Image (tube, rainbow, N blue to C red):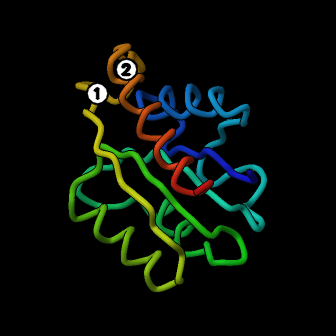
């Protein structure tokens, strides 16, 4: 399946999660904005770390997506609910199928990258369910 696994920002726990998921599906994780833009991807899995407001670089990238670039999006995030709703709204406007959002626990400090094994297993199960949904 043609897919991308992206994260924002470049560091921290979300990047660790993204790299582990990318490895699980033999993909290369990339930052947002990616080195190579989405192009007719069936699935985009995004890891987003954000506070109560979305950063400008993230917003520009999300608003640049359309159904020619990606058809389905799943997201894991530690963002505030208001940011999640804003992101969902952007995809709804573009007609992109938003499959699921998974809340993950925010790292106590933004530079910490440690992920507990049970957190990773939970995220892998979430991703597996997303993949099974698209295959069915």
Identity of the residue drawn at 21% across and 59% down: 81
Identity of the residue drawn at 65% across and 37% down: 29
Identity of the residue drawn at 59% across and 29% down: 19
- Disc 1: which residue: 107
Q: Quadrant of residue 120?
A: top left
Asked if residue 46 is positioned above or below residue 53 in the image, the reply reads: above
Asked if residue 114 is positioned above or below residue 130 in the image, the reply reads: above
Identify the mark nearer the N-term, 1 or 2. Answer: 1
Q: Quadrant of residue 100?
A: bottom left
Residue in front for this viewpoint, 67 or 57: 67
Circle 1 crowding by C-alpha within 10 Å: few under 14, some 14–19, many from 20: some
Circle 2 crowding by C-alpha within 10 Å: few under 14, some 14–19, many from 20: some
Asked if residue 19 is positioned above or below residue 33 in the image, the reply reads: above
Identity of the residue drawn at 72% across and 36% down: 27
Identify the disc placed on residue 112: 2
- Left or right: residue 13 versus residue 41 is left
Tell me residue 8's x, y (percent).
49, 46
Tell me residue 114's x, y (percent).
39, 16
Dots 1, 2 in contact, CB < 8 A: yes
């Amino acid at each position: 399946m043609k897919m991308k696994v992206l994260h924002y920002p470049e560091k921290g726990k979300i990047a660790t999660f993204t790299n582990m998921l990318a490895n699980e599906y033999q993909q290369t994780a990339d930052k947002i904005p990616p080195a190579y833009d989405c192009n007719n991807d069936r699935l985009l899995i995004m890891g987003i770390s954000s506070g109560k407001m979305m950063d400008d670089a993230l917003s520009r990238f999300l608003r640049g997506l359309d159904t020619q670039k990606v058809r389905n999006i799943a997201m894991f995030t530690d963002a505030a609910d208001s940011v999640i709703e804003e992101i969902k709204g952007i995809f709804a406007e573009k007609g992109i199928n938003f499959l699921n959002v998974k809340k993950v626990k925010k790292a106590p400090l933004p530079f910490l990258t440690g992920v507990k094994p049970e957190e990773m297993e939970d995220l892998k199960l979430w991703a597996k369910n997303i993949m099974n949904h698209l295959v069915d």
